[in-house]
Amino acid sequence: MPTQEGHIRPRNRDGMQSFDFEVYDGVRWVTLNDHLHFIVGADSLQGSQQARRRYTVQSSMYDGDWEVHSTASSVTESVTVDVLGVDQIDVSDGLLLLEEIFTQAVYNIRVTRDSVRETWTCYPAEWSIDRGQVQSHNIRAQVRLSIPRFPKKTYQAVV
């Protein structure tokens, strides 16, 4: 039987233990995954794509285009947030809060998965609201956000 030397990391069979999605509203961090007022949808943050702006010149010496410079462009994150309430006034207040937060000129978002926290710097988001009959009868609404952010993000270990 083969042996392994060194540190063996135990495997977590239960999956992720904690998740939080927070937005800075200019005064405080507002959690959007407290399961009382907001729930971040399971289909959120499934993938993002990084594109680059490329500056090229034509060169007869190299038989084609030559890239002289490239920079990372903004990344768009897709997030779905369910807004909950005890009545339609609560739901409307939650929707107004989200609109106020996500239309700021520049704001920060923190995404915490277990003990790792990412911080993004973002621009005003594009959004759509679903307040259809099924949502209204369940005293909730769903907001789909397309959040543009700077390409770089910071990472922290949370203990």
Image: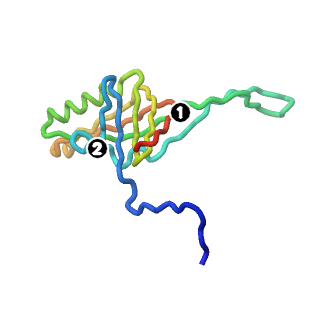
CA–CA distance in space, label 1 to label 2: 25 Å
On-image quarter of the N terminus = bottom right
- Above or below, comparing residue 126 to residue 159 in the picture: above
Q: Nearer the viewer, residue 20 or 85?
A: 20
Q: Which residue ends up furthest to the right in the rendered image?
A: 61
State which quadrant residue 121 falls in.
top left
On-image quarter of the C terminus = top left
Instruction: Locate residue 41, reporting x and y percent.
Output: 33, 46
Identity of the residue drawn at 81% across and 28% down:
59
Instruction: Locate residue 37, reporting x and y percent.
Output: 22, 39
Q: Residues within 10 Å of mark 1 (few under 14, many from 20)?
A: some
Instruction: Locate residue 34, reporting x and y percent.
Output: 26, 42
Identify the mark at residue 151; answer none if there is no mark: 1
N-terminal of the pair, mark 1 or mark 2, is 2
Instruction: Locate residue 107, reporting x and y percent.
Output: 40, 26
Please tell me whether mark 2 sits on a helix, a strand or a loop. strand
